Image (spheres, rainbow, N blue to C red):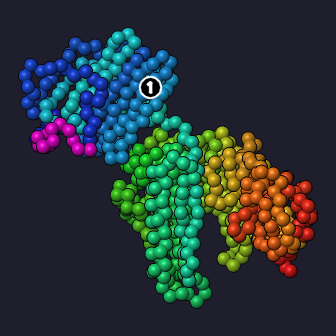
Amino acid sequence: MKRRMMILLSAALVLSLLAGCAVPGLPFTNSDTEVEPDGPSAEPEIDGGVKDSTDPNAPKTIKSTEITRFSCWFSTIPDADPGVLGNRIVQLTAERKGDTVSGVYDVRSEGGVKREFVADASFMDELQGIAEMYDLAQHNGYSYHVSGIPNEFGATLDVEYASGEKIYASDNQDNFLSYGVMDALLQLFTQACAAEPELVATSVEQQFEDAAAYVAYPALTVDETGFDALRETLSDISVGEAEEGHGAQERFGKTPQNGILYYNAEAELTRSDTELVSFFVKASRYEDADWENEMTEYRGYTVETATGRQLGFSDVVRDMQLLPVAIEIELSKAYPDLDFYDDMAEFLRRSVESDDGNVTFALSYGFLHIFVNEYIVADAPGGLHITLSNISYPYLLEAFYRTAPSRHILTLDYGVDYQFDSYTNLRMDWSSPSEYEPDITWTATVNGVVKEEDYYGYAPTCHLVTVDGSRYLYLRVPSGDVSMFTEVYKLTDDGLQLIDTVPLSLRTPADMDPEMMRMDLNEIVYSGTTFLMPTGFYRVGDDGLPEQAGSLFTLSGAPVALKQSGRYNPADRADAAASGGMWNLVAGMQLTPLQTDRETFIDFITDDGRVVRFGIDGFRDDMQLDNWGTLDDVFESPNG
């Protein structure tokens, strides 16, 4: 590699004449390495002048094994084939302070990142292991400097030991560090930066257009404050998704005889935390009666939480050369009956490198979702979905994107292979005798062990709940036409172990926080006039089962009319604050169920937003509402 840089010298001289030694967009210079300069020169430097200050007597063996300070600066920009390192400038520093190590990981490139970290003293032991493995002391004393070239080439190494011994080497033209040592250092520092992220509440809601044909698209919002940049980006994405829906509606052709034209885009959150918010949109459309098949395509979005910046493949994937190869391998495994194009690999490579959207992704915990719009790899109108797990491809992603909260929840897709660790694999499928049959056979395969269940109506929605290393599968199971309940399974080495069947069903889209899950209670409270479906917040207990996390439950149900007029007299200040004080209730007034604590009160709300709180003796169908009587005494029957 040395001396081939001389070929670039003339171009570098032009750059230096135009812009000095600074390169626009690359303000990172060797002066940032904290390395002491060689001292004032007796003569002014001349562009292109070479200064070789190598000390041939510098020791090539270091007796001490205790590093106290480490600083390394290197560039891979001039490399024609940088491999997984990419073309970038890297600054790594670490300093021991007592029992801890303070470090900085700073990468300058397109979409660069700077992170600070604190590690325990063992970090320096690992660093010393790298120094010994790659014999960093062999470079000690080397110093080579070419005047006038931009500060985007070469490398500098500066290491201090507790014994006072040092390793110092510098070259501003060629990078003297081996590929192996740079790779090892990057892995060590990125892993030190990989702090466990905290979950961030992000909501996904489906928007519907009141049109002659069916049009639906997602809208995403951040529920928590302090994420203004993220909120703005998600708003922009939601506007774009709405425009996709409106565009499809404008393209609707003639209406089919037996059916309806439609566009349906649904978003699925795959990650939402202080590091990233990532999700994918599955858009299914039937725009013309002459179409033979439904068209399906995927769009993936990954947004940096702190900055709101949308990330592409090159931002999160460490090995861009491996990525298209891995996609081709997994596609062939997942879709063995699909007739792929002979040049599929080239199409994949081009799309990944250009981020043109034909191959897109969403980042999750433990694996990377990959979506391929089918027409670029096969003659078909659909979209393909695979996952690349951290187990099968351990160094595909940057280390700080491989971390996960210890407790989180994910929605799982059908027909996709998931690998959660070295011994837990899961795949779910469903089948039906025909498109007109309501019976569904659900199949789950865990480590080769197959489990089948029959359900009526449609396949269950499945959520993976992770609690401190244990994994549970929550199935939102249909029961009859409208009722739902949840089956909870634990994932074990031997397959799925049924824990319990609970009268709760997780709402979709699911909150990603297992400490505060929104669930519907399937135990209906009813009377002759109304029925109520209490819902509320739950947490996943250590046994994998949901347990109540709050005392307030939301009620859903049709509005009901009062039988009699009367004066509403709040019981206390809290009730008065909720309702707006004393006022009259009029017979025939419509009240809509709102909320209850299932023990002491039940709230209804009027059309103008006033809350009526009734005290109750017990949450049952013959409950007493203060001195008003039972439900049958208070409300008109909806059937007259």
Horizontal placement of 232 versus 257: left or right?
Answer: left
The reply to whether residue 283 is visible in this rendering is yes
Q: Amino acid at mark 1?
A: Ser
- The x, y position of residue 243, in whole percent, is 45, 70
Local SS, label 1: strand
Whether residue 268 appears in magenta in the rendering, the answer is no
**Viewer-side residue, 185 vs 209:** 209
Residue lying at 68% horizontally and 59% vertically, measured from the top left: 507
Residue at x-position 82% and y-position 63%: 568
* Mark 1 surroundings: few (<14), some (14-19) or many (≥20) residues within 10 A: some
Percent of width and height locating residue 114:
39, 37
Residue 24 counted in the magenta span = yes
Which residue is painted at 9% across and 33% down in the image?
47
The x, y position of residue 149, in whole percent, is: 16, 36
Q: Position of residue 406 (x, y in %)?
A: 62, 40
Is any atom of residue 187 visible in this view? Answer: no
Q: Please state which of residues 633 and 279 is positioned toward the viewer in this rendering.
A: 633
Q: Residue at x 40, y 48 (%)?
A: 315
Q: Eyeballing the image, is 34 above or below 333?
A: above
**Quarter of the image containing the N terminus?**
top left
**Eyeballing the image, is 180 above or below 637?**
above
The magenta region covers: 14-25
In the rendered structure, the answer to whether residue 183 lies left or right of residue 24 reads right
**The C terminus lies in which quarter of the figure?**
bottom right
Foreground residue, 538 or 69? 538
Q: Which residue is mark 1?
A: 102
Instruction: Classify residue 427 by image quadrant.
Output: bottom right
